[in-house]
Amino acid sequence: MSTTFFSRYHHRISYQVILLGTIGLLASTALVIADLLTREEIALRQAEDFRATLEQVLPPEIHDNQPQDERHLLLLKDGSTLPIYRARLDGRVSGVAFQVRGRGYAGPIEILMGVDASGQLLGVRVLRHTETPGLGDKIEVARDPWVLTFNGLSLGKPPLSAWAVKKDGGQFDQFTGATITPRAVVQAVRDGLILFQNHQADMLQRAAEED
Amino acid sequence: MFSTLLADYRQLMRDGLWDNNVVMAQMLALCPLLAVTTSATNGLGMGLASTAVLIASNLLISSLRHLISPDVRIPVFVLLIAMLVTLVDLFMNAWLYELHKALGLFIPLIVTNCAILARAESFASRQPVHRAFMDGVAMGIGFTLILVLLGAVREIPGSGTLFADARLLLGEGFAWMELTLIEDYRGFLLMILPPGAFLAMGFILAGKRVLDQRRQAAHSASAA
């Protein structure tokens, strides 16, 4: 086993350099090929994923367009921009979806929320988070129906003071062992609703000019 | 010939599962082990992904063993393992998207799994391909078993369930695996957090020592 054709050269520096170089080159080639092969597929999967989530927060009954193709950048009053997706029924905007971010226990929680023209929540879904597995990840709809309790709520229902977890005197359940995570989601959704209220005309294109 | 091969494989299996288990005997791979075993399902996911990479890395390194110069073997191993992990990550993301969503968090962690480098160094680089393959299978299964065991030991007192969310990992057909052992359980947070991992791990290691000592005592008693 020890005397093969190559083992005679094992201790030469030039052999080692060529070996390392070749392996590095081959590994990078393999990765480039794999990246090219999978890039399109991965982007497609992620787009499908986002579309599926969008479909959950903008139910098909309220629109006859493709909200994922109606992406607009909304200029907020503080000067920043927010991408929104509009749902239309007979040309009129019947709802919008946009992302909000909560500050969770272990990092940002990216939330997609859908609001109808009257300001009622159509749905809330968590897109990305890094909360503790087994505790905070109950905000995922696949693991727990908690996030569905937002459906149908709005800024007046419940009143603003009740937009908090029960521990803070609000009406939303927290999880055993995890209060920070649901608190962050509740706050982010509430802030999203306030943002909607402040920009309602722009969001719904009810103002005189289009964006 | 065939029977000696079989006996050899059985010995490899025995080493991987118990005598020379990655975690219980070699004390390797504790970082991913303690981090992800908050539930038996997470342990299973990490175990399966690590096993796949371990087998692939053992195969690749064993087939290149004559080419690899001993002086530069470590960078070569690290490069090959990092490449394999990235390839697995990309391919799963593209073609096993649902599984990737469940396992995605674990795959990059495999690079930090020193057990894979250790098997490359101490076994695959010196052994023929078929033995390296068997070693990868045995070590992988041994690692997976410990991950699932530690996950279960932490999950049952920690959240009162067993294999929670297994359907997200294995598909809807495995929903029967999800057990709620204690109804309306408030949870015991300590077991889910890292200190619980160390505690449970300590008891598992102590348990193995006790079993090994008993076996040895029985062995020497029967010999005497």
Image: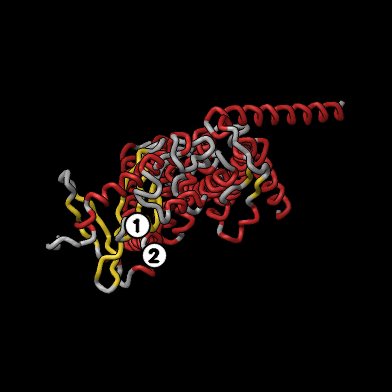
Residue at numbered disc 2? A59
Residue at numbered disc 1? A114
Considering depth in this image, is A187 or B10 the residue closer to the camera? A187
The answer to whether residue A80 is left or right of residue A90 is: left
Residue A68 lies, with reference to residue B197, above or below; the image says below
In percent of width and height, residue B224 lies at 87, 25
Residue B151 lies, with reference to residue A52, above or below; the image says above
- Judged from the image, the secondary structure of the residue bearing numbered disc 2 is loop
In percent of width and height, residue A31 lies at 34, 53
The answer to whether residue B102 is left or right of residue B13 is: left
Q: Quadrant of residue A115?
A: bottom left
Identity of the amino acid at label 2?
Pro
In percent of width and height, residue A5 lies at 44, 48
Question: Between marks 2 and 1, how big is the CA–CA gap?
Answer: 9 Å
Q: Chain of mark 1?
A: A
Contact? badges 2 and 1 (CB < 8 Å): yes
Considering depth in this image, is A12 or B158 the residue closer to the camera? B158
